[in-house]
Image: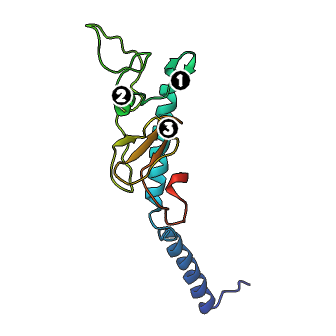
Amino acid sequence: MKQRLPLFETFAAVLAVAAVAFLTALPNSGEQGGEKNVELHDGLSVLRTAVFRFSMDHEVAGSPMMPGGADVDLEQQLVGRSRGDGGTELLNDFEDRFFGPYLENLPVNPVNGLSSVRSMPPNYSSPVLNGSCGWVYVPATGKIYADLAGADARGVAYLEY
């Protein structure tokens, strides 16, 4: 003999399943700007990889050369072609720039909407973050940062990204 569930229990079970399905379908509202933080991490990863690849292709006196050296445009070194000495201008009538490009274009910083990069002076070992560009590069250390002062919604400083 089959026993049937009472109507109330059946209705409660369907309602519980519907509530779980509804809550699962809701977007994660626990963190404001979560997608932008993920995109920011992605952009930093792409830039840091390009800087690393450049430094592995170029060397000075047997040591890796960081891009953005004296009077050289960092953006051109990453999105253009370069010689072994890091120079990007075409000096001869024939192509002598065999390295790069390392990026198709600079990624956009999703928080401030800028894609430009600002290099710190050679004597600086840490960045000055003021939001005037998308990214800040420190040639002395080879590190690149998001040009964002302050912290994200979780309280993590953008400097720590």
Locate residue 111, reporting x and y percent. Answer: 39, 56
Could you tell me how far apart the alpha carbons at marks 2 and 1 are, in whole angstroms? 20 Å
Q: In the structure shown, which secondary structural element does the residue marked by tag 3 occupy?
A: helix
Mark 3 or mark 1, which has the lower sequence index?
3
Locate the N terminus by quadrant.
bottom right
The residue carrying pointer 2 sits among few (fewer than 14), some (14 to 19) or many (20 or more) residues within 10 Å by Cα, namely: few
Q: In the structure shown, which secondary structural element does the residue marked by tag 2 occupy?
A: loop
Badge 3 amino acid: Arg
Color theme of the render: rainbow
Mark 2 or mark 1, which has the lower sequence index?
1
In front: label 3 or label 2 = 2
Locate residue 156, reporting x and y percent. Answer: 55, 60
Give the number of the disc on residue 48: 3
Could you tell me how far apart the alpha carbons at marks 3 and 1 are, in whole angstroms? 12 Å
Badge 1 amino acid: Met
Badge 2 amino acid: Asp
Which residue reaches farthest left?
93
